[in-house]
Image: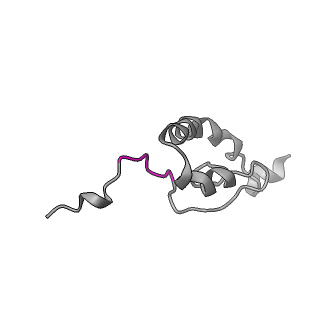
Amino acid sequence: MSDDVWKRDEIESPCIKICVIHPESRLCTGCLRSIEEITAWSRMSPDARRAVMQELPSRAPRIAKRRGGREGRRG
């Protein structure tokens, strides 16, 4: 028996369950979405979700900067 009622043709969330908001960029360090995108995700159209998903890789450099350790003490 198949439960087709619960199968949806939707874009999955990029959430990886590391939900920490970067203080400067205001992006989640796990999925790279903004708080607004995270809260609106379930109401977004498939096209809007696709647009967010396409943009996520370009956001990674905004949170990649290290803040501590040896590199932080050099400057």
Tell me where residue 24 appears, x and y as whole percent: 79, 51
Residue found at x 68% / y 55%: 35
Q: Nearer the viewer, residue 34 or 75?
A: 34
Chain part drawn in magenta: 9-14
Residue found at x 50% / y 50%: 14
Dividing the image into 4 quarters, which one contains the N terminus?
Answer: bottom left
Residue, far left: 1
Quadrant assignment, res 61: top right
Residue found at x 55% / y 47%: 44
Q: Nearer the viewer, residue 73 or 25?
A: 25
Tell me where residue 10 appears, x and y as whole percent: 41, 47
Image position of 46 (left or right of 19) = left
**27 versus 56 height, above or below:** below
Tell me where residue 67 appears, x and y as whole percent: 76, 54
Q: Is residue 18 magenta?
A: no
Image position of 9 (left or right of 41) = left
Q: Is residue 10 magenta?
A: yes
